[in-house]
Image (cartoon, coloured by chain):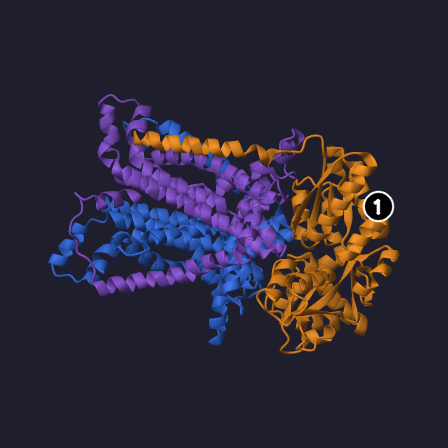
Chain colours: A purple, B orange, C blue
């Protein structure tokens, strides 16, 4: 979580801390780099070396191709809907769980985590079982001309399911640690419910919220398994970036496939840049808070 | 104040995204669209056929038709259609998958009688791809069960093409020896030599060609030619066995959906178009065996003489073949369970 | 229906609204869709259900899925703890870069990850070259599956430990130091117990995710029945036989196991929090 890091790097808070011996530090950092090399750098390197294997112009052509652009648009649309929807839910769930005591809290928390543990295959399957045209609900929708599965809404719903816990998961420990004192104090001073939320809770949790939104966004960009089940795989219509990557790969069009995959890496890195950029911005202004 | 900054950023980001959206929903106005749901290896074929048909239809009726394509594993595609993917036509790897669609009442149970040649405008067969120079001297089916030969073929449970591979091997042995028992032993020995069962035909090709696994790949004839084209004919060669199966990938109009979309005439014209000399030429150029004798003669050089048997000769029909061999507890499962 | 009912009056507002919305959304997105798995297996009847979920191939696939997910989660526990420690405690070149890349496994589609690992470890790949020299095989073996799952589960562990580690008060460590404890002792006796709940959460999530993972694994697993066939693939092959009840049956078993694991985890944490407070 970024917040504590800010206060640590703040000059007035900074103090001499005991630290590990230099040799231990070097060893541990070395080991971390070794792990990253094997599991992160090499796959990443492979993506880029394949993506640029036929040079810049081929790369640009691959990502400018109309189908690729449609796939990017669909993915961005999905993210633009999924993240805010899950953010509202995440805040609401975290508020209910951390500000009150009630029976069955751990059941509720486990249910929140469930989508993490559900196989993407199952995640797609359940929506087919729920609104597929063989089900009563699905055929009713079909009669009224509403298409969910094998079109954009299906992709969005499946993505919401898969990325459902990220924001709540991020906020709950944070809000648990912060307790209820500030809100209760505000209440006794006469603040109203929503006022408390906007003026006290939200500023307090904004880092966790932002962070959860970034994770949620990253995951919804990359989701493959569940989306693959509910997408009709129609080029230019129901293909997200990951599905487009798979199609290109199946067409033995490796360079183009990795070129489009590298877009995903850039999108992921972009979110991280935004994150650290905002961190710096808030760090500078942290006195005004 | 700072929270406002977040809000501003979030808002402008949403606006930027929203402005890009309309394209996603752009349904070309005034055009007729047709959705062809097909299996994996036909991508290249239908890209060309669609272009040809679009031109043909434009000339014939003045309408501009947009044909959308969806590709994936044959079984998976059939399931998608059953669950509501509104395909106007299906062009799948095996009749069993279209039978399953018929079972859910989306099209007539006698669909296969509606078009000529069992509703299969093109056929293919199963051949081998080996590394250049054929280092393991693989000439026929019997060479696949030799020790030290590593065979690549996909999983018959999840791949339509893999089922054709399996049935070709079985049929070869049963025709040779007249014994189903011997055929079973043969197929069992063959799968002993298989180190990886990818989920689809394209996955197997990649294992063989891109990852360098195995000595021989069992594949559709059209895929084999595509491999030579994509990965280099200096690296691989095609070996045709003496006997193989006549693979008939069928096509059908999905009645329920064309009625809903009002596209029956177009869908039927599209499938009938596949039988025209022009389309048959494209079929042959993509290394599917054309039905039209003239086209077959014209491209005879691409299609070596293989003694082909039909599925019906050996296995009756697809439903019984599926039940005996590939369903849970079937022969394929018995091969692997001790 | 005493579930989700408030225990004692609390002066803060918004319980009804937030809880109502949470339960509604949870039901619409998670509970109702997931219950379809259950309803779909009902027409099967008891005996076919048991047969479907205990067929030898299916049992072998559970064994494989659980053991590979377990080893991967174990490896992630070590690698994740190490990474979180290094990122929080040390300053070194490339730190921000590493921190950024931790989330990569979330963003990279699982299929791309699977293809990457399969290519890297294939006999023609960068690492496969090295590995075959030592006469080892990774691709198409359970080891390959473990490697893919380590990648998939890694961010869960790092991202759950990181915030807790950042909040650990250095005073405690300093005090321990003054009392003559070595660094290692401090770590084992003070830090590790403190980090343990977060570590447990991260590892459980990585484990649960590993059991269900499909996209990346099928490229590297080999998918041989009884040997390298994972449980989600069994679901897929049932579906391809148009046997959606059978597929749901296996899905239901996986779901129940995952859910009980999460329930256990959250109960343990609840209990630990109470201990900690009192």
**Left or right of B254 in this view: A52:** left
**Left or right of C252 in this view: C274:** left
- Is residue C32 at all visible to an observer of this figure? no
- Is residue A278 at all visible to an observer of this figure? yes
Which part of the image, by quadrant, shows the N terminus of chain A?
A: top left
Relative to C175, say whether B242 is above or below.
below
Front in this rendered view, residue B155 or B288: B288
Label 1 environment density (alpha carbons within 10 Å; few <14, some 14–19, many ≥20): few
Q: Where is residue A161 in the image (x, y as percent from the top left)?
A: 49, 41
Which subunit holds the residue at mark 1?
A: B
Residue at position x 35%, y 29% in the image = C15
Residue at position x 46%, y 50% in the image = A265
Q: Where is residue A91 in the image (x, y as percent from the top left)?
A: 37, 34
Q: Where is residue B326 in the image (x, y as percent from the top left)?
A: 68, 60
Residue at position x 67%, y 73% in the image = B132
Relative to B272, say whether A80 is above or below.
above
- Name the outermost residue toward the right: B294
Image quadrant in which you'd find residue C78: bottom left
| Secondary element type, mark 1 | loop
Which part of the image, by quadrant, shows the C terminus of chain A?
A: top left
Relative to C5, say whether C171 is above or below.
below
Front in this rendered view, residue A264 or A62: A62
**Number of numbered discs on residues:** 1
Check disc 1 and report the residue beneath it: B114
């Amino acid at each position: 979580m970024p917040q504590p890091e800010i206060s640590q790097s703040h000059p007035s808070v900074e103090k001499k801390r005991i630290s590990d011996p230099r040799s231990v530090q070097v060893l541990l950092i070395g080991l971390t780099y070794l792990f990253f090399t094997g599991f992160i750098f090499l796959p990443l390197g492979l993506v880029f070396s394949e993506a640029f294997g036929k040079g810049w112009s081929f790369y640009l052509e691959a990502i400018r191709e109309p189908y690729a652009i449609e796939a990017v648009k669909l993915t961005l649309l999905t993210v633009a809907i999924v993240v805010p929807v899950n953010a509202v839910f995440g805040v609401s769930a975290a508020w209910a769980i951390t500000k009150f005591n009630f029976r069955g809290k751990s059941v509720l928390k486990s249910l929140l985590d469930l989508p993490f543990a559900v196989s993407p295959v199952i995640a797609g399957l359940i929506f087919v079982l729920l609104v597929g045209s063989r089900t009563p609900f699905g055929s009713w929708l079909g009669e009224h001309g509403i298409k969910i599965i094998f079109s954009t809404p299906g992709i969005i719903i499946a993505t919401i399911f898969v990325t459902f816990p990220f924001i709540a998961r991020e906020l709950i420990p944070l809000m648990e640690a912060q307790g209820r004192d500030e809100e209760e104090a505000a209440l006794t001073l006469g603040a109203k419910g929503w006022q408390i939320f906007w003026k006290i809770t939200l500023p307090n949790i904004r880092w966790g919220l932002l962070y959860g939104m970034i994770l949620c966004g990253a995951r919804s960009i990359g989701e493959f398994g569940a989306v693959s089940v509910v997408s009709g795989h129609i080029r230019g219509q129901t293909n997200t970036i990951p599905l487009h990557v798979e199609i290109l790969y199946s067409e033995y069009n490796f360079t183009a496939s990795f070129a489009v995959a590298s877009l995903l890496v850039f999108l992921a890195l972009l979110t991280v840049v935004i994150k650290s950029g905002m961190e710096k911005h808030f760090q500078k202004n942290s006195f005004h808070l | 104040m700072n929270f406002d900054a977040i809000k501003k950023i979030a808002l402008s980001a949403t606006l930027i995204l929203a402005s890009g959206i309309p394209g996603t929903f752009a349904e070309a106005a005034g055009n007729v669209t047709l959705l062809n749901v097909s299996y994996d290896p036909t991508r290249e074929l239908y890209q060309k056929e669609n272009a040809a048909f679009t031109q043909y239809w434009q000339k014939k009726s003045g309408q501009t038709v947009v044909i959308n394509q969806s590709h994936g594993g044959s079984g998976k595609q059939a399931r998608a259609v059953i669950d509501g993917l509104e395909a106007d036509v299906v062009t799948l790897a095996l009749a069993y998958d279209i039978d399953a669609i018929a079972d859910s009442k989306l099209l007539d149970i006698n669909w296969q009688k509606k078009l000529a040649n069992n509703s299969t405008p093109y056929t293919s067969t199963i051949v081998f791809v080996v590394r250049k120079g054929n280092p393991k001297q693989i000439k026929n089916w019997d060479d696949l069960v030799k020790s030290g030969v590593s065979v690549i073929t996909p999983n018959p449970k999840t791949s339509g093409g893999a089922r054709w591979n399996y049935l070709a091997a079985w049929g070869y042995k049963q025709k040779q020896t007249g014994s189903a028992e011997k055929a079973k032993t043969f197929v069992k020995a063959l799968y002993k030599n298989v180190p990886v069962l990818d989920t689809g035909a394209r996955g197997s090709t990649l294992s063989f060609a891109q990852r360098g696994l195995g000595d021989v790949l069992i594949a559709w004839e059209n895929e084999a030619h595509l491999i030579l084209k994509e990965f280099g004919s200096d690296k691989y060669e095609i070996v045709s066995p003496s006997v193989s199966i006549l693979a008939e990938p069928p096509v059908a109009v999905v009645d329920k959906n064309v009625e809903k979309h009002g596209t029956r005439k177009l869908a039927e014209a599209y499938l009938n178009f596949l039988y025209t000399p022009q389309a048959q030429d494209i079929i042959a150029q993509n290394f599917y065996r054309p039905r039209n004798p003239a086209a077959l003669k014209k491209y005879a050089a691409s299609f070596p003489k293989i003694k082909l048997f039909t599925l019906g000769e050996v296995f009756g029909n697809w439903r019984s073949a599926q039940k005996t061999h590939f369903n849970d507890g079937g022969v394929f499962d018995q091969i692997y369970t001790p | 229906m005493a579930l989700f009912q408030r225990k004692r009056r609390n002066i803060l507002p918004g319980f009804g609204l937030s809880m109502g919305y949470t339960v509604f959304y949870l039901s619409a997105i998670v509970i109702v869709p997931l219950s379809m798995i259950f309803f779909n297996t009902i027409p099967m009847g008891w005996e076919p259900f048991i047969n479907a979920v205990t067929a030898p191939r299916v049992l072998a696939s559970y064994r494989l899925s659980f053991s590979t997910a377990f080893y991967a989660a174990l490896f992630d526990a070590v690698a994740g703890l190490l990474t979180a420690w290094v990122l929080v405690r040390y300053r070194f070149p490339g730190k921000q870069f590493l921190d950024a890349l931790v989330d990569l496994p979330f963003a990279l589609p699982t299929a791309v990850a699977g293809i990457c690992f399969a290519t890297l470890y294939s006999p023609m790949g960068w690492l496969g070259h090295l590995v075959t020299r030592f006469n080892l095989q990774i691709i198409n073996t359970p080891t390959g599956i473990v490697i893919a799952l380590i990648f998939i589960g890694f961010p869960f562990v790092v991202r759950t430990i990181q915030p807790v580690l950042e909040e650990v008060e250095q005073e405690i460590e300093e005090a321990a130091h003054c009392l003559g404890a070595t660094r290692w002792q401090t770590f084992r006796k003070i830090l590790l117990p403190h980090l343990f709940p977060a570590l447990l959460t991260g590892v459980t999530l990585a484990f649960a995710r590993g059991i269900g993972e499909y996209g990346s694994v099928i490229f590297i697993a080999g998918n041989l029945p009884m040997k390298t066939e994972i449980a989600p693939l069994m679901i897929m092959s049932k579906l391809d036989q148009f046997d959606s009840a059978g597929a749901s049956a296996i899905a239901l078993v996986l779901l129940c196991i995952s859910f009980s694991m999460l329930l256990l985890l959250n109960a343990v944490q609840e209990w630990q929090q109470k201990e900690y407070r009192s």
